[in-house]
């Protein structure tokens, strides 16, 4: 059974800092992994999809990496801004299925 | 449409009542998913449709929950005899493919269900 863990649960940084969010998963037989952003009271916004054949995926100031062998993914945010404040969720497929298993998220606060 | 839409955005009901939650996926997306999110938790899978058929309903908590997608587009999640523990945000997602490495799921804004 897939289990996804995100560390830390919360993170507060000053504006401009580079930061890393961590995600670990127990079942490495995945074909992709997805990172999402969730603002308070809102739905999920897809940030990045990393395919199993990729090691990294980039979108603007965001870079996600995937290491299947160690069961880890990281989301790197460069030059953080107050508008980046949100909860970031990592999700990996349950083995052999289409259903995503989510971590509890990391709540990020970027202070001006 | 431009994105996944869900109606209503908020639903307050009394214990024991029946509710229906609606999801309109992105046009052309064949796969549709329902998840449920409780406060402080990540979303939990409920059911997945490929076209009109439920390909995986292993996440439905009990037989009070049922979902349909009769024409392979709009889906309705139905909850009978609601209980206070059903209170949560119900999220719908769709994806253009049925699976595989390119299967990116796109989420709607959710329906916040409160059972009094």
Image (tube, grey):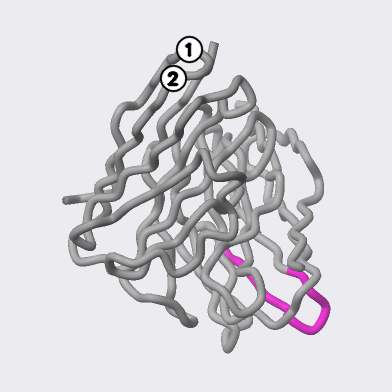
Q: Do the residues labelled 2 and 1 touch (CB within 8 Å)?
A: yes
Q: Residue at x 74, y 59 (%)?
A: A4
Q: Is residue A11 magenta?
A: no
Q: Residue B108 carries which label?
A: none
> Horizontal placement of A74 versus A81: left or right?
right
> Label 1 marks which chain's residue?
B
Q: Name the residue under label 2.
A: B17
Looking at the image, residue B60 sits to the left or right of residue A95; the answer is left
A95 shown above or below B91: below
When the figure is inspected, residue A39 is found, relative to residue A53, above or below; the finding is: above
Percent across and percent down for residue B53 are 34, 67
Picture quadrant of residue B22: top left
Question: Which residue is label 1 attached to?
Answer: B14
Magenta-colored span: A63-72
Residue B35 drawn at (x, y percent): 51, 47
Q: At numbered mark 1, what does the secondary structure look like: helix, strand or loop?
A: loop
3D distance between C-alphas at marks 2 and 1: 6 Å
- In the image, what residue occupies the spot 61% across and 39% down? A87
Q: Which residue is drawn at 23% across and 51% down?
A: B74
Do badges 2 and 1 share one subunit?
yes
Q: Is residue A20 left or right of residue B94?
A: right
Chain letter behind tag 2: B
């Amino acid at each position: 059974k897939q289990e996804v863990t995100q560390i830390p649960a919360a993170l507060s940084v000053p504006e401009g800092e580079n930061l890393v969010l961590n995600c670990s998963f127990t079942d490495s037989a995945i074909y992709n992994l997805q990172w999402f952003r969730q603002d308070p009271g809102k739905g999920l916004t897809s940030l990045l999809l990393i395919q199993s054949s990729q090691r990294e995926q980039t979108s603007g100031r965001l870079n996600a990496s995937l290491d299947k062998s160690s069961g880890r993914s990281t989301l790197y945010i460069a030059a953080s801004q107050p508008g980046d404040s949100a909860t970031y969720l990592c999700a990996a497929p349950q083995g052999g299925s289409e259903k995503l298993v989510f971590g509890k998220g990391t709540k990020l606060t970027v202070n001006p | 449409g431009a994105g996944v839409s869900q109606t209503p955005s908020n639903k307050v009901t009394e214990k024991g009542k029946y509710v229906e939650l609606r999801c309109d996926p992105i046009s052309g997306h064949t796969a549709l998913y329902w998840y449920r999110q409780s406060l402080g938790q990540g979303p939990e899978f409920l059911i997945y449709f490929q076209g009109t058929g439920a390909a995986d309903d292993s996440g439905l908590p009990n037989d009070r929950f049922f979902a349909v997608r009769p024409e392979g587009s709009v889906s309705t999640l139905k909850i009978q005899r609601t209980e206070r523990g059903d209170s949560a945000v119900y999220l719908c997602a769709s994806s253009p493919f049925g699976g595989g490495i390119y299967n990116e799921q796109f989420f709607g804004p959710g329906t916040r269900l409160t059972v009094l």
